[in-house]
Amino acid sequence: MLSQIKKLFFSVALAQLAACGANPYKNYEKKDPAEDATVALEEHNPNKAIEILTSALAGDPENWVYVSILGLAYAERGGIDALTLAQNMATSSSSASTHGVTSLFSIMPEATDSNISDVDTALTYMTSIPPASRTSADVLKIAMFETAALTLRTKKYDLDGDGTISPAEALAMSGADATVILSQLAGAATAFASGNSTSATDKAAAAQVTNIQSKIATCPGATQSDQLKNYLSKTGC
């Protein structure tokens, strides 16, 4: 069964198609690619959804419904469930002592290069949608995928798999990764702020992102990257 968040994303996409005069259920012999891709994702086959939508976008590159579902397909292939992530962020935000990023490690897939690449690709597609064309579901996906991407990029430095980042592990973090993590954190905060969601879960997740930013800013360090590393390893923070 699809999670609530997927049902929301799919219903928004199909509603957009209907508003444009395309009834996805009118002609079963000539289904819209968005419907075929949605069925593929329901069947937990993101590769098929990616194939369908990549082909469709070749002839219709500014079909933002296709782009939005394609972003979801890449995220799913990368092991990300946006609803589970939002709920866990909301739960962890209730603890002032919790380091929000590492508290999400346990619900993340393995921090492999392929998973990180898939989530980054999902973000690339989502942020390619012009702001004026984004639905509220699109904005939420951007916020969740930014959060997932930065968490996975951090998790790969948990070399001993204990669910935390030690000072030695933090020192091993490359400057490039630290810069991307900080950028994605800022991107998540911006997306949450622009989304103006009334959902208690979304508000709590947004508060968690803001809390992480605030805590990083209070950590010692000559650069933001140093502050991030000290935050993750709890050094002086």
Image (cartoon, rainbow, N blue to C red):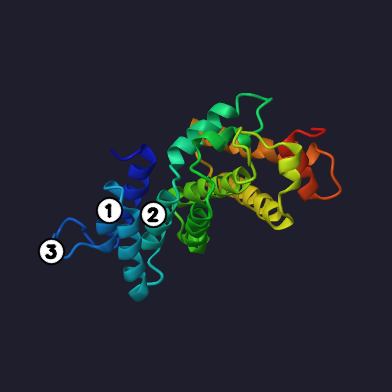
105 lies left or right of 15:
right
Q: Residue furthest bottom?
A: 59
Dot 3 or dot 2: first in sequence order is: 3
State the mark number for residue 40: 1
Whole-number angstrom distance, CA of label 3 to CA of label 1: 16 Å
Dot 2 corresponds to which residue? 73
Q: Image quarter for residue 155?
A: top right
Dot 3 corresponds to which residue? 29
Q: Is residue 21 visible?
A: no
Query: What residue is shown at x 50% (from left), y 40% (from top)?
Result: 108
Q: Residue furthest right?
A: 222
Dot 1 or dot 2: first in sequence order is: 1
Dot 3 or dot 1: first in sequence order is: 3
Q: Amino acid at mark 2?
A: Ala
Give the answer, above or below, for where 11 lies relative to 50.
Answer: above
Q: Image quarter for residue 102?
A: top right
Whole-number angstrom distance, CA of label 1 to CA of label 2: 9 Å
State the mark number for residue 199: none
